[in-house]
């Protein structure tokens, strides 16, 4: 299969959907969108031009409606994404602004639209947050479909593909991705897009391997080239040698076997060999991800990051919209709990309409709870929505970025006000709702004994806790080697919080990425972490590891770990003590 004179090329991208596939590339392109003419129109033609634009929007929207109607069963849960796109067609920033540009500048609709979209892109450019990039991609997808209608270009029809191929595209919109038929498409790769893009989410649901953000895949790959997509590692290999092919065929079959074994047992409880049960829960950003938490055997939602709903629109969502979303998640997940984290915008997740963009150090700025306490109306609206959802199943509230005791008290005061207002209106909610705080700032860890008196649970957010404790930017690749989850300082900090939690009879959960990495589990068990929350796909593996471990041994092991002074020392100890399960998972070296 791999006979070719061209040499093997390896491309590295973002691993958005795990698994390996090998097959022929099928390049999908969009016509007529890149080149847009500019011409002026006369005042007399203004009305016609606007009509032409409106009609292009209508056609694009109708086409989307048709896609929604014919979406296959396994993707019905994602209709919501397409519905969001439908709303975007009439979005003020896109629809309103384009009409305004046509009127003010007397230019053709294509040019006006192109201008508006490039302004939107510029606005989002300085916001590195992946959610925002994803939302920008939504606007671009919608505008492209309008543009296709304006210039009369052919649209991409993925359903028409007749052979079994791997899709290669600059970008795929959620509407296009949702047309994928599993019996035809083995995997997909794109130049653009990232982990939290909707395309990535859909690929994960379909369980097809996908690597996005490859930058130049469409330049390097031709139709019918043999390619290997490793969605687990985020690698794409073009023109693989026979040796590489054999190697990846073997990996592919190992992966399938491993996945089948793990998934089969994913609904068993995560109980250690000495009978301690941990709740292994899922982290979600979008309501539709609840389904994967359930499919992967999650015991609940340990972290519902609620920023997305604020980032995906152009003004603050109202209580009703928020409530609808939370209620959906709670009802689907019941009787298992849903931990809803209050808004953690600002910092690196800037929301344009709530902007305070000239902060020098946004990560140390007005983010998380700080933002909410400064904007109590925004906070109260969200708290009312969460409380209302608590009438439909077990809900817990989680406060992000707590750095001092005052913040806990102030947040609880607003929560009480929100509860009182619902009470007065006779609206039902759980008046004993549990409230927890994220431990992600070292000062909160140090004050944990004080905090413990006022809250029901801790959730250790290691993504930020590591960043703030070690003074290492979590997204700066220059210092990535210093971002060490198993640094002795981090282990001591977690131990400090876990011990206080135990003394105060407060539950301690971990919801940072550290919780979903198999290597860390013996240490987390030994430290006395009660529950873990992670990306849904990691749940089956982590549950399986927990079932093979013993808390007593893990606690003894942690005693030795605490004597080590470097992360390397800890890793060496870990690999020499737990070589069995680490080897089974495919870890062969440090
Ligand atoms: C964390 O900081 O560990 C966390 C879970 O929150 P986020 O990744 O949303 O900052
Ligand atoms: Mg955080």
Image: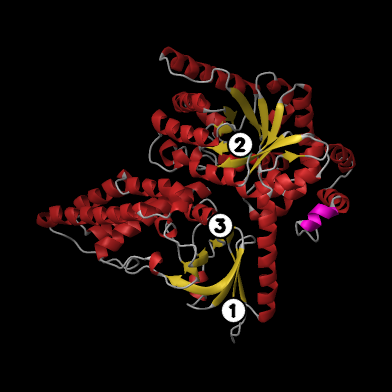
Disc 1 designates what residue?
Answer: 239
Q: Is disc 2 surrounded by few (<14), some (14 to 19) or many (20+) residues within 10 Å?
A: many
Question: Label 2's element?
Answer: loop
Disc 2 designates what residue?
Answer: 300
The mark found on residue 207 in the picture is 3
Q: Which residues are magenta?
A: 579-584
Choose top left, top right, bottom left or bottom right for residue 464.
top right
Which residue appears at 73% of the width and 54% of the height?
Answer: 481
Q: Is disc 1 surrounded by few (<14), some (14 to 19) or many (20+) residues within 10 Å?
A: many
The mark found on residue 177 in the picture is none
Looking at the image, which is closer to me, 111 or 529?
529
Choose top left, top right, bottom left or bottom right for residue 249.
bottom right
Q: CA distance from mark 1 to mark 2?
A: 43 Å
Residue 27 place in picture, x, y as percent? 45, 72
Looking at the image, which is closer to me, 25 or 130?
25
Q: How is the image coloured?
A: secondary structure
Quarter of the rendering occupied by the N terminus: bottom right
Question: Would residue 581 be found to the left or right of residue 434 on screen?
Answer: right
Residue 512 place in picture, x, y as percent? 66, 41
Q: Earlier in the sequence, mark 1 or mark 3?
A: 3
Quarter of the rendering occupied by the C terminus: bottom right
Choose top left, top right, bottom left or bottom right for residue 251.
bottom right
Q: Is residue 239 visible?
A: yes
The answer to whether residue 463 is above or below residue 192 is: above
Residue 562 place in picture, x, y as percent? 86, 40
């Amino acid at each position: 299969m791999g006979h070719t004179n061209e040499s093997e090329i390896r491309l590295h991208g973002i691993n958005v959907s795990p698994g390996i596939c090998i097959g022929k590339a099928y390049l999908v392109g969009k016509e007529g969108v890149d080149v847009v003419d500019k011409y002026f129109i006369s005042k007399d033609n203004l009305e016609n031009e606007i009509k032409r634009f409106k009609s292009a929007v209508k056609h694009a929207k109708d086409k989307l409606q048709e896609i929604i109607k014919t979406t296959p069963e396994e993707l019905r849960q994602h209709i919501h994404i397409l519905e969001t796109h439908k709303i975007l067609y009439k979005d003020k920033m896109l629809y309103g602004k384009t009409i305004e540009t046509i009127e003010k500048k007397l230019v053709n609709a294509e040019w006006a639209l192109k201008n508006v979209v490039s302004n939107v892109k510029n606005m989002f450019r300085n916001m590195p947050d992946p959610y925002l990039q994803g939302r920008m991609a939504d606007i671009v997808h919608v505008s492209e479909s309008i543009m296709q209608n304006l210039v009369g270009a052919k649209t991409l029809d993925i359903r028409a593909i007749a052979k079994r191929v791997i899709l290669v595209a600059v970008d795929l919109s959620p509407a296009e991705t949702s047309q994928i038929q599993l019996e035809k498409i083995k995997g997909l790769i794109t130049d653009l897009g990232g982990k939290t893009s909707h395309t990535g989410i859909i690929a994960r649901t379909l369980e097809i391997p996908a690597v996005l953000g490859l930058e130049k895949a469409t330049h390097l790959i031709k139709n019918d080239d043999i390619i290997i997509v490793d969605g687990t590692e985020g690698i794409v290999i073009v023109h693989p040698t026979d040796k590489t092919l054999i190697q990846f065929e073997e990996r592919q079959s190992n992966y399938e076997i491993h996945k089948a074994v793990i998934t089969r047992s994913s609904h068993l409880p995560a109980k250690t060999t000495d009978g301690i049960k941990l709740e292994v829960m899922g982290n979600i950003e979008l309501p539709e991800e609840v389904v994967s938490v359930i499919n992967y055997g999650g015991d609940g939602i340990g972290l519902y990051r609620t920023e997305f709903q604020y980032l995906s629109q152009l003004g603050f969502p109202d209580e009703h919209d928020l409530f609808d979303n939370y209620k959906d998640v709670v009802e689907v997940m019941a009787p298992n709990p849903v931990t809803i984290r209050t808004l953690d915008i600002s910092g690196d997740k800037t929301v344009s309409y709530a902007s305070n963009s000239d902060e020098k150090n946004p990560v140390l700025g007005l983010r998380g709870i700080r933002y909410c306490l400064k904007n109590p109306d925004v906070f109260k609206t969200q708290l009312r929505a969460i409380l209302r959802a608590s009438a439909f199943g077990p809900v817990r509230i989680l406060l992000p970025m707590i750095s001092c005791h005052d913040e806990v008290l102030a947040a609880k005061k607003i929560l009480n006000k929100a509860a009182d207002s619902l009470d007065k209106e006779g609206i039902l909610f759980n008046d004993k709702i549990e409230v927890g705080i994220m431990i992600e700032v070292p000062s909160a860890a140090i004050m944990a004994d004080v905090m413990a008196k006022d809250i029901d649970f801790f959730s250790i957010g290691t993504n930020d806790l590591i960043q703030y404790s070690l003074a290492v930017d979590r997204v700066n690749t220059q210092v990535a080697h210093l971002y060490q989850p198993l640094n002795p300082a981090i282990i001591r900090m977690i131990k400090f919080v876990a011990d206080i939690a135990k003394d105060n009879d407060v539950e301690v959960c971990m919801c940072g990425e550290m919780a979903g990495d198999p290597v860390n589990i013996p240490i987390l068990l030994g430290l006395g972490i009660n529950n873990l929350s992670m990306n849904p796909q990691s749940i089956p593996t982590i549950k399986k590891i927990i079932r093979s471990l013993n808390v007593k041994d893990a606690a003894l092991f942690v005693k030795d770990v605490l004597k080590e002074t470097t992360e390397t020392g800890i890793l060496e100890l870990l690999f020499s003590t737990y070589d069995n399960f680490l080897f089974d998972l495919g870890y062969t070296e440090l």
